[in-house]
Image (cartoon, rainbow, N blue to C red):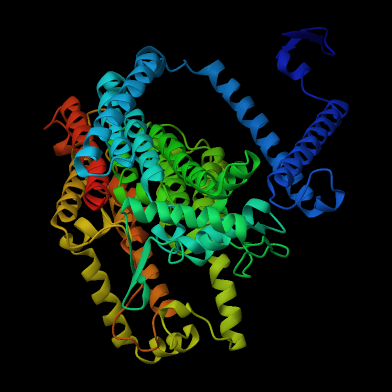
Amino acid sequence: MSSTTNSNGTDRTKPAEDDQRPGIGRILLRAVCVALAAACASILLEAITIFGSPIHHVFDLASWSRRRLVVFFAIAIVAIIATLVIRKRRLASERHKPKRQIAASMARPVPSAIATIAAIALGMLLGTLVAQGMGHPADPRYGIVISCALIVAALLVINADLILKAAEWGFLAIAIPVTMCMCLIMPTAAEVSWDGQIHFDNANALSYITSADYSGADQFMTVGGVETGCLTITDGRRGDGTITLDHEYLERSNDNLRRADQEIPVKEARGTAGYGTFTWVGRSAPGWIPNAFGLWLGRALHLDCVARYTLSRMCNALFFCFVSFLAIGRLKRGKLIASAISLFPIGLFMAANFSYDPWVNCLVAYAFCHFAGKLQAKERMTATDGAVIALTFFAGALVKAVVFPLALAFFVVPKDRFESRRTRIIYNLWIVGSIFGLLASFALPFVINLMAGAKMGDMRGGSNVNSGSQVGFILSHPAKASGIVASHMITMLRPDNLSWRMFYSDAYLHPSEFWGFIVIGWVEYALLLFVSLFDRDERDVVFGPIHKVAGILCPLVTFLLITLALYIDYNPVGSEGIDGVQYRYLIPLAPCFCLLTLNFKRLRSLIPEQVTSSVFHVVVAIATVAPIFLSFVTQF
């Protein structure tokens, strides 16, 4: 404390922190230091980018891009400021709140590491024996799959006490081994998942920021999987293709990629254009950042094309796992609900590929987990909470802005939960800004093009697709159009369809009629309902009727807009049915519905928390690992 004397001669004190407030000079000095650090970082990032380029050289000044330097400088500025702000807030919170000791007291890193190494060694040994018995001694994937199962089992057993107290660690114990296994044993071709070649093209262009270089293997990956030798097209439609998992075909695919990398000349794209001449700049760009970072890092390490693409998919998977881990940790109760949603096999499959869906799924889930966690903790909502919820939701939903109605649920906060009226206004303004930003990102371009008479629509739906004419059809036949949309929504929401089409599907990798996948889907479906109803205890906060109504209406309205958007953008004018609405689009809707709606006080004490946690992790581990065996082992 520092002492001062006022006019009547008495002493008054003020906190010492007031004496330490930075003046103008100190603020300017800090700004200069941040700018210099960002400048150095941008030069280093540019040098690494050029070092990884197949045709440019660091010591060639013509290879340096001023535009890229500016972008790297801006990224560095944001990263440095964000780091300083987070560090300051963390230090402040540690002064006023007791440190959490759960993870520190129960974590077992050394036994976990030893068990992981032992599981890999044993799994590879057993895999070698199985491969020899199956007549495929040169195929290491048997060992990788068996190692994955052993690692998951070992981590769950060793860290059982920690997982019971903090379920997010159980999520990591399952998600990381499974996604890494998928990355290692799936075909290298980008088109393993939906529109993978498009996602790869944009991720590769984004990884250069500007003036991307496409090697011969990059060009193969962008064109698709047909030329690589492992994708088979049926009925003349790429969407009906299937991936061949035979080891011989995979080796041929990798050899074709490596040969193309050596024989096909590098193609230089102009500006922000990709190989397909489309720019990566747009609202979908954030979703490709994890994949782009992996490609950038792989080039910096001078990995060969196959290793580089595998690393890119691993980065996407690790980003998904890390953000989902943080999201689950934000909850006070109901962590198993968020874990179940994040462990959908279809979600893990996309995380291990070239896709922007993982970006949407994990960030939207984080926003709702933060929101629900604050309500559960009976803490006051602050303006900072509004910023965190709004910005994470906006960043995730920007890739698929049509999900913006989900954010309406964030308004359902009692007035007495805010620190002040001013705080409530600021909180609501953050949410409003997020909603209008998302709405404008896709509605304004559509309206402008519609008024200009431009032909719009996704031509993959057919030559008769015309968004403007489809809007005219809907306005002219509202009853018929409403019936088409309602019928499609009801069909998709039928339990028999949801059970396996949403909870388990992996694009081109399996025969969908196989009974094993239907069983897995029903297990996942039942498991989500189980934890949504019983992952509670007496400490939990029962959300009121208004929360349940919001938890039902917001996802339902969002699903309606998704269906209507695809009907307008993807289907021929006047179509009697709706194509293009995939079940994976429903994953971002699940956190809102399950966390806010399925919360019933009478069910809390029926099953002990230990039983709920144990049943969940055992069953979800089996249901998550089993698809790998069904999709891969049965087709080797």
The image position of residue 627, as x and y in percent, is 24, 47
Point 13% across, 56% down: residue: 515
Residue 261 falls in which quadrant of the image? bottom right
Residue at 17 percent of width and 63 percent of height: 513
Which residue is most to the right?
Answer: 25
When the figure is inspected, residue 520 is found, relative to residue 534, above or below; the finding is: below
- Residue at image point 23% right, 61% down: 511
The image position of residue 294, as x and y in percent, is 56, 44
Residue at 42%, 73% (x, y): give it: 565
Q: Quadrant of residue 484?
A: bottom left
Residue 549 visible in the picture: yes
State the residue lying farthest toward the bottom. 476
> Who is closer to the viewer here, 218 or 575?
218
From the viewer's side, name the closer residue of 394 and 140: 140
The N terminus appears in which quarter of the rendering?
Answer: top right
Judge whether residue 397 can be spotted in this image: no
Q: Nearer the viewer, residue 581 or 96?
A: 581
How many labels, in total? 0
Relative to residue 515, is residue 572 drawn left or right?
right
Q: Is residue 499 left or right of residue 104?
A: left
Instruction: Point out residue 614 in the picture as x, y percentages from the top left corner.
Output: 19, 29
Q: Nearer the viewer, residue 48 or 397?
A: 48
Judged left or right of residue 258, residue 205 is right
